Amino acid sequence: MKIKVCIHAVIGMSLLCSAGVASAQAYPNKPITLIAPFAPGASADGVARLIARQLSQSLGQTVIVENRAGAGGTTGLIALAHAKPDGYTLGIGATGAISVNRHLPDAAPLNPDTQLSAVSKVADIPLVLVASGKSGLKSLKEVITASHQPGGLSYGTSGQFTSHHLAGELFASQAKADMVSVAYRGSAPALTDVMAGQIPLAIVDLTSAIGAIKAGKVTALAVTGARRALDAPTVPTIAESGFPEYSAGGWLGVFAPAKTPDDIVNKVSSQLKTILADPKVKSEFSTLAVEPAYLGPKEFSAYINEETQKWGGVVKAVGAM
């Protein structure tokens, strides 16, 4: 009897393993929906459409982009969390919706840790600190000195608790600078006021600022990421400018509903790794002023944990918690 039980157990395990291999081989056998929680036309939406087109080719099935904007990128991810975990609904998540919004008192009902599966990080979104020509500010050292004047130094952002705003708060904390954020509805209006001299500084995405920087309408003081931006290689990082522990910026990743089978997650992630290494894809990313940045499921999950802890501390220091 014991021998029969053992034989049955071995057969059962073999069937389970075969089923797992079969599911990976069979996937996908119908169209996939990629939820983009952004408005059509945004650079992040452009990334979603580029990823969808490339995945369609590599997986041999149509990948359809479905825009579901709202709640700072959270609305679409809530829809993703409630989708069937079979790999046929994926979504794009950004820094705010994944690592920042959960720390806010009026956060939407989404817990990325338990409701989503991280598939791959796909892109970094460079942010840049720019100064008005009328401000006379030419370096971070001058910014810090000017911030110690009565009233501090104001800087524009794309909105309260966006990655732009929190990048500024993190810098102010590390530099012991007195800086006051001014929330705008996006990078474009903040940049407009900097060019007009209405505010001395702004932290904006490089997508919005690169034209004004090249035209000499604003001065790029530093980028906020861990490395120099590909589209602005002469602009130093804040870390290079005397704050080695500093790193901030936006990022985008692909997610699936929680409990999506590992073999499916790994298959999609493997395809994305190949896609992001393609020179033609890198060139297309550059036109969107974002940079390909691949991390696999485990590495991406660890990265999200680090980002969540970091931004939670900044949000708390700002006083939102």
Image: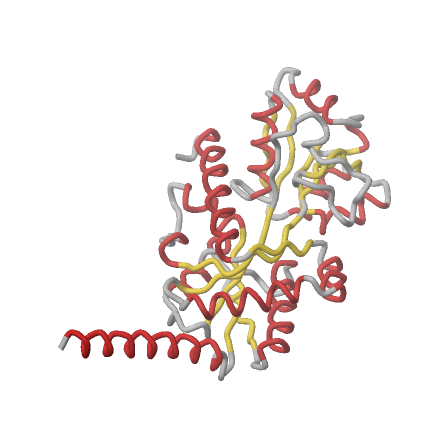
Residue at 41%, 41% in the rendered image? 103
Residue 131 lies left or right of residue 215; in this view the side is: left
Tell me: residue 45, above or below residue 203. Answer: below
Residue 212, percent from left and from top: 80, 45
Residue 314 lies left or right of residue 245; in this view the side is: left
Q: Nearer the viewer, residue 148 or 34?
A: 34
Residue 58, percent from left and from top: 62, 76
Residue at 39%, 78% in the rendered image? 18
Q: Total label count?
A: 0
Residue 144 lies left or right of residue 67; in this view the side is: right
Tell me: residue 6, above or below residue 314. Answer: below
Residue at 68%, 21% in the rendered image? 144
Instruction: Locate the C terminus and report the quarter of the image it occupies.
Output: top left
Q: Nearer the viewer, residue 308 or 102?
A: 308
Residue 89, percent from left and from top: 46, 71
Res 42 → quadrant = bottom right
Q: Nearer the viewer, residue 202 or 98?
A: 98
Residue at 61%, 26% in the rendered image? 179
Residue 157, percent from left and from top: 62, 40
- In the image, farthest residue toward the left: 1
- In the image, farthest residue toward the right: 215
Instruction: Locate the N terminus and report the quarter of the image it occupies.
Output: bottom left
Q: Nearer the viewer, residue 284 or 295?
A: 295
Q: What colour scheme has been applied to the protein in the rendered image?
A: secondary structure
